Image (cartoon, grey):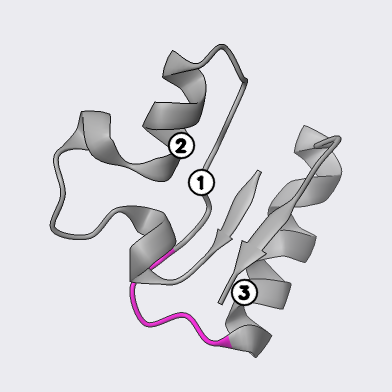
Amino acid sequence: MLTGDSFTQGYDVQADETISAVLRNLGFTAISIGMNGNGPLREYAVLKEYSEPLTPSIVFSMP
């Protein structure tokens, strides 16, 4: 699971060039919950909301 801001979201790049897409192409299961404009508090709130039902084994925070 990747959390962060627009960089993590993949703003202004092709869908197959996002960090999560590249990781998936390398054989990893990856999901990005990064959103444009996120700051540390919002990243934490989104992470709390989505990490419990998805139970990721690794979380990368890219502020």
Type of amino acid under label 2: Ser
Residue 55 left/right relative to 3: right
Look at discs 1 and 2 and give the one toward the viewer. Answer: 2
In the rendered image, the vertical position of residue 31 relative to residue 62, given as above or below: above
Q: Position of residue 4 (x, y in %)?
A: 53, 67
Q: How far apart are labels 3 and 1 at the CA level? A: 11 Å
Q: Is residue 38 magenta?
A: yes
Q: Residue 20 got which mark? A: 2
Q: Is residue 42 left or right of residue 35?
A: right
Relative side of 20 to 30, left or right: left
Tag 3's secondary structure?
helix
Three-letter amino acid code of the residue under disc 1? Ser
Up-down: is 63 above or below 18? below
Residue placed under numbered mark 1 in the picture: 32
Vertical placement of residue 52 versus 22, above or below = below
Query: Are the residues flagged by discs 1 and 2 in contact, CB closer than 8 Å?
Result: yes
Of circles 3 and 2, the one toward us is: 2
What secondary structure is marked by label 1? loop
Quarter holding residue 17? top left
Quarter holding residue 12: bottom left
Highlighted magenta segment, given as a residue range = 35-39
Query: Disc 1 or 2, which lies upstream in sequence?
Result: 2
Residue picked out by circle 3: 43
In the image, farthest residue toward the top = 27
